[in-house]
Amino acid sequence: MKYPRRKLIAAAAVLGVVAGAGAGYLVQAAREPRLPLLVQPTLPQARGPQPEPLTAEQDRKVRNDGDLRELLLEKPGGTTTPDWVAPQGWMDRGEYADLSDEPDSYYEHLEEQEFLRAAVTGWDAGGHQVEILLAQFEQREAPAAPADDSSRSRYWAETDPDVRTRPLPGTGEGKVYVHPDPSAETTALPGVSAEAHASRGDLSLHIWVYGDDPVPLSTIMDLAERQMERL
């Protein structure tokens, strides 16, 4: 099983760092100090006009605390909304956990990760279907939760040996993926797909595009870039 082995490797690495740091501290504590203590002089306080506070448009925290659905791309004209898109555009923790192959365990994981809510939209353009999902995390005890959530999806996308992938500009670890062949997974939607996964602030972004024909890389990249501009 891969997950227990990965956890054991991570635990061993952490213990190694802690042990090394402890040994270094004991050696250093036994040595006589040779350098004088550094004294930081008192710094003068800044004076003059202060910068203007950010507006709600500029402050990502204020924007994200509002109606999360307003950050999603608008459905293009002439398209229809598939039945699998939540009617009100919201997903709670249970609905989000259902996206996993192991909903019960993933539900508990989301609780640990301080999952707050998710907003979803999607459309059917005839030749392909699009789903865009924004998951929001509280980031009080688990500040890396959005990046971890995005990383899980990228991990599974990369299990396809034939997948084509490109970095998503301006997102750090964010990437887009194009699968040239239909998935062999029985739970996957029919047809071929493309996807994008990234994170920014307290949000994790997921985009899926499905169609009967291969999805162009430019299509998923354009969707992902335009969505990230709104976050």
Image: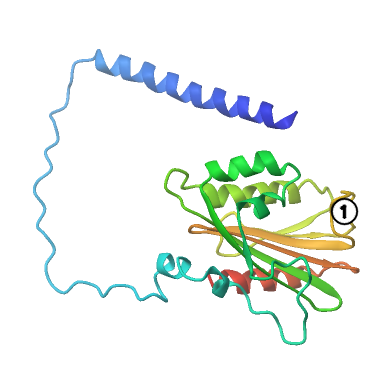
Residue 2 image point, x, y percent = 73, 31
Name the residue nearer the viewer: 146 or 51.
146
Q: Which residue is mark 1?
A: 183
Residue 212: quadrant of the picture: bottom right
Residue reaching furthest to the top: 30
Q: SS class of the residue under badge 1?
A: loop
User: Please, what is the three-letter code of the amino acid marked with disc 1?
Assistant: Ser
Residue 146 image point, x, y percent = 54, 52
Is residue 105 toward the left or the right of residue 184 in the image? left
Residue 75, above or below 202: below
Residue 104 image point, x, y percent = 68, 41
Residue 46 image point, x, y percent = 13, 63
Packing grade of label 1 (10 A; few <14, some 14-19, many >=20) is some
Residue 189: quadrant of the picture: bottom right
Residue reaching furthest to the bottom: 78
Is residue 202 toward the left or the right of residue 76 in the image? left
Q: Residue at x 74, y 57 (%)?
A: 165
Is residue 204 toward the left or the right of residue 60 in the image? right
Name the residue nearer the viewer: 20 or 96.
96
Q: Residue at x 72, y 52 (%)?
A: 99
Looking at the rendered structure, the number of numbered marks drawn on it comes to: 1
Is residue 132 toward the left or the right of residue 35 in the image? right
Residue 43, above or below 131: above
State which quarter of the image contains the N terminus.
Answer: top right
Residue 5: quadrant of the picture: top right
Q: Residue at x 23, y 15 (%)?
A: 31
Q: Residue at x 69, y 70 (%)?
A: 87
- Coloring scheme used: rainbow
